Image (cartoon, rainbow, N blue to C red):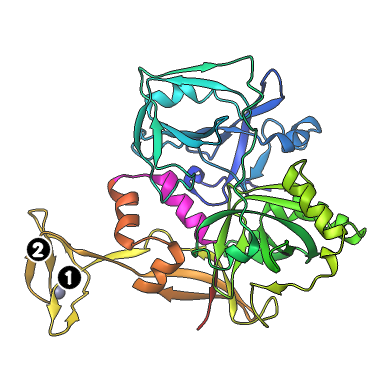
Amino acid sequence: MPINLTANAISAINPVVQVLDIKLIGTTQERYRLTLSDSESTQQAMLATQLNDRVKTGRVRKTSVIRLIEYICSTVQNRKGDGKVFSFDLLDSGGGEIRVTCFNAVVDRFCDKIEAGKVYMISKGILKPAQKNFNHLKNEWEIFLETTSNVHLCPDEDASIPKQQFSFRPISEVESAENNSITDVIGIVTAVNPSVPILRKNGMETQRRILNLKDQSGRNAELTLWGDFCNREGQKLQELEEAGFSPVLAVKAAKVSDFTGKSIGTISSTQLFINPDSAEAQTLREWFDQGGKDIASQSISRDNMPVGSKNEIPITFIKIDTFCYTACPLMIGDRQCNKKVTRSGNSRWQCDRCNQEFEECDYRYLLQAQIQDYTGLTWMTSFQESGEEILGCPAKELYMMKYEEADDTRFSEIIRNSLQTIYVQA
Ligand SMILES: [Zn+2]
């Protein structure tokens, strides 16, 4: 059978790629580094340690063709061949957290050095305001590394620095949290629904699984797991639940959604901890076992709306090459012209309808998305407001990101995140 590799897979959403090489690295913890090819370019990839057995058992080896369902791009080469980004998040013993980012040539200096769970001393970094669209850490600043910056591993790890830091919100507070905000939640899993496949246009599937979480605040909420979370943690939670143990689940960095009531869902950077060894987990466990179990609580999610209602439509695919157009900003009477405009010779924009030129044009979404409703797969077109709601940022911002800054990492992150939203038909 002929095998077709996905050309330009590095920027695609679920690329099919070939493994050219596998290297074992890491001294304290085994890690595998893969060299992946999409037939046009190659890319280094670190395998998540929980997938190490795929390599050990020979399921993934040199020349294997694999499909990447869930991955984080920390270093991406764009079409011009420059524009690499690498970032990592730091915690300190005072309870603080901050993101560290570097670009281009500096990436090669630091990206192999940094290992999760290790302690580092960083000097001569530059502080810049945090980019809140992409960075949900509780810090107004980000550290940027330059060629003159230094990163030193501190081998005598300081036990006062936490390995993981949560700022849990009671479920009753999630009820008033802003849509798309990122939050940490801890609760008892009281129900686990089966994993449901969601089909994408190209025949690829992703999984969705809905759980119910309850805490001492008198509220419960739905937590939607996407992709690998469904089979990894989701399966384990289901087994625990079926065996009569209601596990404690700590959720780091989930996204708040308010399409139907309030609920939370996983994003690619979410981390789930089942029965974590922490004071909060223990308090919750005791509360639940000593009667909390039987206390009625009110759901903040989908009031009276059963899961899988026909109004609830997951977006399964977005056409990215034509997501927006350049529009005429001039007013015709009380309405904006909005006709598609093109560059005139002198780098200004030209509207054929108004027969005028101007410096700045408008950017309007014309988003073609594939949705899966109860009848199957269909296409819908979203204009300015709903496009902005789906993607969570103005069309102009996304246009600049893709065409001016050529920031493919961020662009595909936004597209990926939007696939995790559920669009509800009015
Ligand atoms: Zn016009």
Q: Which residue is mark 1?
A: 329
Crowd tier of the residue under label 1, counting other residues whose Cα lies within 10 Å: few below 14, some 14–19, many 20 or above: some
Task: Identify the secondary structure beneath mark 2.
Answer: strand
Q: What's under tag 2, amino acid-wise?
A: Phe
Residue 421 tag number? none
**Horizontal and vertical percent position of residue 52:** 74, 33
Label 1 beta carbon less than 8 Å to ligand 1: yes
* Residues shaded magenta: 405-421
Does residue 261 appear left or right of residue 379 in this picture?
A: right
Q: Residue at x 59, y 81 (%)?
A: 311
Q: Earlier in the sequence, mark 1 or mark 2?
A: 1
Q: What is the quadrant of residue 190 in the picture?
A: bottom right
Does residue 407 appear left or right of residue 31 in this picture?
A: left
Q: Which residue is mark 2?
A: 358
As for residue 237 lying within the magenta part, the answer is: no
**Horizontal and vertical percent position of residue 124:** 37, 20
Task: Identify the secondary structure beneath mark 1.
Answer: loop
As displayed, is residue 209 above or below residue 109? below
